[in-house]
Image (cartoon, rainbow, N blue to C red):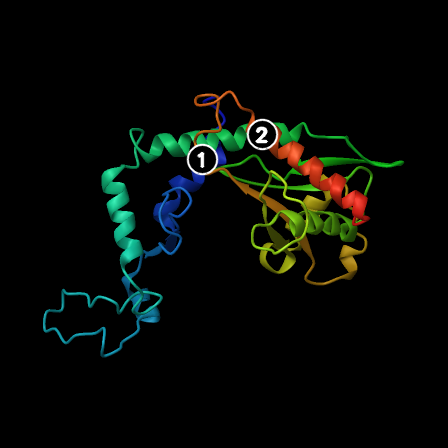
Amino acid sequence: MPKDIWPSQEVYDAYKAIPSFDSVTIDPHKLGYVPYQAGSIVVADKRVRNLISYFATYISQVNDDPSTIPLGTYILEGSKAGAAAAAVWAAHRCVPGNISGYGKIIGESFEGAHILYQKLQNSKNMLIKYNTTEKYFSIHPLHCPDTNLLIYLVNEDGNTSLAKLNKINQAIIAVTSPKLNRSAPTFNLLLSSTSITELEYGRGCLKALFKKLGINDVDFDKTKNTSLSVLRSTLMSPYTTPDYTTANYEDVVVVGIKGVLEYLLARGDI
């Protein structure tokens, strides 16, 4: 990965501004390779802890020392187990977060995300056929990844309808999500999804995305709480880059999406 790709100036400025934040959340299950339950929040003003405090006789103890913080009192989930926190500590003691440990792994996963991004950027005008029916589709990454998480969607070439765009991507998820029971064929592809909603991201964000995707926003202006269904890929493995393999895993993703589109076209779902 070229050195000038990451971090971008925007990402660098965001990290540099962290000391001025009121609070920062830390979720180490992706880039820390630790159990999903692990997570924490850091606040600049310790008075905030009173807003999340929970006192229960079975986890609180009377202590005359004012410098002692009662364990289990100032956490978001009361008396939750400490195994996940211990796992984070132990993992990073054994494999440090610098270039000799997790830092190396994380860097490779970032590179893998950029390789996939470039591949998806070039995946346009894909011909999908079933019998005499022929349609063209393109994959549209919504951003150049800042980490190892890439968000994108698939649209039929020439489509300007938000409803049809959402239908296409929801149909893809219906046959590829590991969370859903399905009778569809097994594709060499696992995807997750999310929605970019007006309520969470604002109307301006969605309108900018619609313009980029060529979606007509006339109907959007008449609706409320509209959302955009998108696909997500998180490249956790460091072994998908040229440093470790000659296999082109980014090609596997594109071939998998083509296979899903062929299946959906045959079913009449798209």
Marks 2 and 1, how far apart in space? 13 Å
**With respect to residue 152, does 205 lie above or below?**
below
Q: In this view, does 29 lie to the left or right of 95?
A: right
Q: Does residue 169 sit above or below 250 in this rendering? A: below
Q: From the viewer's perspective, is 145 left or right of 195?
A: left
Crowding at dot 1, Cα within 10 Å, few <14 / some 14-19 / many 20+, comes out as some
Q: Where is residue 42 in the image (x, y as percent from the top left)?
A: 33, 55
Is residue 194 among what the camera can see?
A: yes
Is residue 204 shown above or below 110? below
Residue 7 visible from this viewpoint? no
Q: In terms of sequence position, does the residue under pointer 2 or pointer 1 come before the other? A: 1
Q: Is residue 219 above or below residue 211?
A: below
Regarding mark 2 in the picture, which secondary structure is present there? helix
Amino acid type, label 2: Glu
Residue drawn at (65%, 57%) of the image: 198
Kindly identify which residue carries mark 2.
Answer: 250
- The picture places residue 26, in percent across and down from the top left corner, at 37, 51
Few, some or many residues within 10 Å of mark 2 (<14, 14–19, 20+): many
**Residue 50 image offset from top left, x and y in percent:** 30, 70
In the figure, is residue 99 to the left or right of 202?
Answer: left
Q: Front-most of 178 and 150?
A: 178
Q: Position of residue 1 (x, y in %)?
A: 48, 23
Say which residue label 1 marks.
237
Residue 31 or 90: which is nearer the viewer? 90
Q: Which amino acid does label 1 sit on?
A: Ser
